[in-house]
Amino acid sequence: MKRAIYIPGLGHEQLDISVKAYALRVMKSIDEHNPDPSKTYRIESSDREYDGDGSISDVISIFEISTDAEKEIYRFYEFKYGKLLMGRFKESNILYRFFSLLVVLVTRFLSVLKSLFSFKDEINKKSKIQALYFTVIYCALAVYLVFLVPSLLALLTSFTENIEQLKFLSDNINRFETEYKAVLASFAAFMLLTPNSKNIFSDMATEYLAANQYLSVGDRRLLIMGKLNRLIEVICEEDEDVEIEVHAYSFGSVLAIDVLFPYEAEPSLRIKNSVAKLVTIGCPFDFIEIYWSQYFSDRKYSNLLLSEWINIYSDLDVLSTRFDGYPVKKKTFINSEEFWDKLGSVDTTYNMVNPRQVSFLQMLMFYGLKAHQTYWDKHVDSRSCLSQVIKT
């Protein structure tokens, strides 16, 4: 029986990225690649507490049913890190989040410009342009949301302008009455057309800030890595000879890389001796390097059991990354020819449309970011990139 840890992306994704949905997609791919029509498959759900703090991992088992027997062939454990990563930002008020987002984006803007005009790295120029465009749009959105506060004050003073104590405030705000009314009117119209937008904006701001703190100063990294190590330890205690697969999507790929290839401290003994396969889907390696140019540099390689890495990317997904054909990137990340020779080819392309047919206008409408969600559909019976994983 194969055992795997599944590390999802962050929570604002519009597709179902739960471990159950992932396991169902894997099960469908296994079934499609099995020529024996007498074999069928089913899943079974449970949960596993894996530390003293009450951390729970959702566990999904895939069973293969033949004419005379039933056996468990795959068991997925989900590593839930969302609350660990975003805990303190979830508790802060929405104005603080948007103002902090604006400050972070302005500081990161210079990093994007520096990367855009750098010819030393091996990051696709199109991805750099998209990152710059993404930052500008996010800055505009953050400014717009911050401006809502004085706009609301203007509305408030219209009801209190006869109060002498507030007259000075009313006089100053009323100078920009037309602008404030325009902001409020546009926001009201936007909320009317997209009633759930407040929650979406709030969640996106929270995720961006939490990811920024994790990548910039290592906020919550020790806790998250400790929990992930503990989950691996528990799985190994169930079977000492087990070989573990790590499947990670989007930001989950960053956590997988951090736990397998730390910057200075070596990975735990269990990780060295038990993790045999890594699957990264839409890994934002290059995108992070645009903002934090040395984040993945000089990582440790300590004779890991790891012998297979499947990195699934799309030419249209600006958050995904290619490694094959970029020797400098590989060497900067892990400076070991032995490691890369053992893995061989890493990349697997998964394009749902011909990249040449995507227009410049579509790229301005964030097609490059939307493509990050084309590795599978919200319906688990649809085609998915996991057929590439099973086939391999």
Image (spheres, helix red, strand yellow):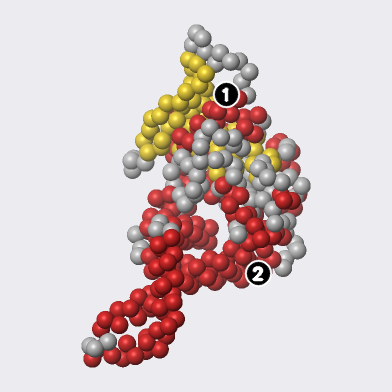
Q: Position of residue 355 (x, y in %)?
A: 71, 49
Tell which of 388 and 303 is nearer to you: 388
Q: How far across and how far down the image is residue 86, in percent?
A: 42, 55
Within-10-Å neighbours for mark 2: few <14, some 14–19, many 20+: some
Query: Can residue 257 be spotted in the picture?
Result: no
Q: Earlier in the sequence, mark 2 or mark 1?
A: 1
- Residue that protrudes farthest toward the top in the picture: 68
**Callout 1: SS:** helix
Q: Residue at x 58, y 25 (%)?
A: 30
The residue at 36%/35% (across/down) is: 49
Find residue 113 and name its label: 2
In this rendering, position of residue 344 left or right of residue 28: right
In the image, residue 315 sits, relative to residue 27, either above or below, namely below
Marks 2 and 1 sit apart, C-alpha to C-alpha, by: 47 Å
Three-letter amino acid code of the residue under disc 2: Leu
**In this figure, which residue is indicated by the disc labeled 1?**
31
